[in-house]
Amino acid sequence: MSQQEVERRLESGELESWPAEDLIKWGFEQFAPRLSLSASFGSPEGMVILDLMHRIAPGQARVFTIDTGRLPHETHGLMDRARERYGIEIELFMPGAERVESMVRRHGVNLFYESLENRQLCCGIRKVEPLKRALSELDAWLTGLRADQSARRAGVPAAEIDRVNGGLVKLNPLARWSREQVDGYVREHAVPVNALHARGYPSVGCAPCSRAVKPGDDERSGRWWWETDDARECGIHVGYERDGSGI
C-alpha cells in the first residue's frame, strides 16, 4: 500500500471501527519492522497490546520504553518478566546525562513539585527528548491510549498521523476499550502487569510522581496529583481533549 493510500485511510476515519487485533495486524503488514510499541510498563494497556502483538506475529513484536532514571523497581521487574514471557528485546532509551545534570544543578532533584513549568521541564528532558530519539527509527508506533482514561484523552482516535513527530503513523488499538475490558483481557490471558496495580496504582510513572488512588477515582488521578486535572500530561500525548486531531 502506498503512503498516499495509508494517509487516505487514516484521514477518512475508516480504521476507527476496526477491532484492536485487526488494527495491530494492519500495522504489521504496512510498517514492520519499522513499527514498535511504546510501552511504559506502568499501565496494563501496553501489556495487553504486547500480548496481542505476540499472538498475531510471534517473534516479531518490537518494543521500546523510556527509562527516566526515576522509575520504581516494580516497573523494572515487569520489564524482566516481559522479556522472559515474550522472548523480546526491549529497546531502552534514557535521557541525556548532561541535560539531567544541568537541570538538577539548577533546579534541584525534585523540581517538579515547585511549579508546572519545572515539572514540564523535567518531563521534557526525561521523557519527551528520549521519545524523539526512539521515534526517529520508526515509520509507525503503537500506544496504549484509551479515550476514557481522562478528560484530556477523550478524543483520542484509534489511528492517526502524528504530525508533531514528523508524520509517523500512530496507532492506538485500545482507544475505545474500557478499563473493564483491559482488566478482563489481563485475567483471561494471564498477562503480566506492574505489581503496583494491586496496591492501588492504576497508572505508574516516575516514583515521585505517582501514588495510589481511592476506588472510583479517575485512573490517572494519581499522576502529578498536586496539579490541576487539565495539566496532567507529560508532553508525549497531548491535544486530544478538543477534537481528536492528534498531538
Image (cartoon, rainbow, N blue to C red):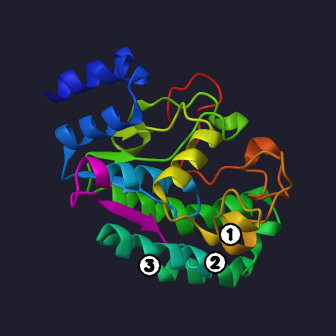
- As for residue 190 lying within the magenta part, the answer is no
Left or right of 35 on screen, residue 100: right
Mark 1: few/some/many CA within 10 Å (<14, 14-19, 20+): some
**Residue at 52% across / 64% down in the picture?**
41
Q: Residue 196, labelled with which disc?
A: 1
For the view shown, which residue lies furthest in the front direction? 188
**Nearer to us in this view, 222 or 162:** 222
Q: Residue 72, labelled with which disc?
A: 2
Q: Name the amino acid, label 3.
A: Asp
Question: Could you tell me residue 159's position as x and y percent?
Answer: 40, 31
**Nearer to us in this view, 24 or 118:** 24
Tell me whether circle 1 and circle 2 mark residues in contact (CB < 8 Å): yes
Q: Name the amino acid, label 1.
A: Leu
For the record, the magenta segment spans: 54-67
- Disc nearer the start of the sequence (3/1): 3
Mark 2: few/some/many CA within 10 Å (<14, 14-19, 20+): some
Foreground mark, 1 or 2? 1
Q: CA distance from mark 2 to mark 3?
A: 13 Å
In the image, residue 197 above or below residue 6? below
- Disc nearer the start of the sequence (2/3): 2
Q: CA distance from mark 3 to mark 1?
A: 15 Å
**Nearer to us in this view, 27 or 243:** 27
Snapshot quadrant of residue 193: bottom right
The quarter of the rendered structure image containing the N terminus is: top left
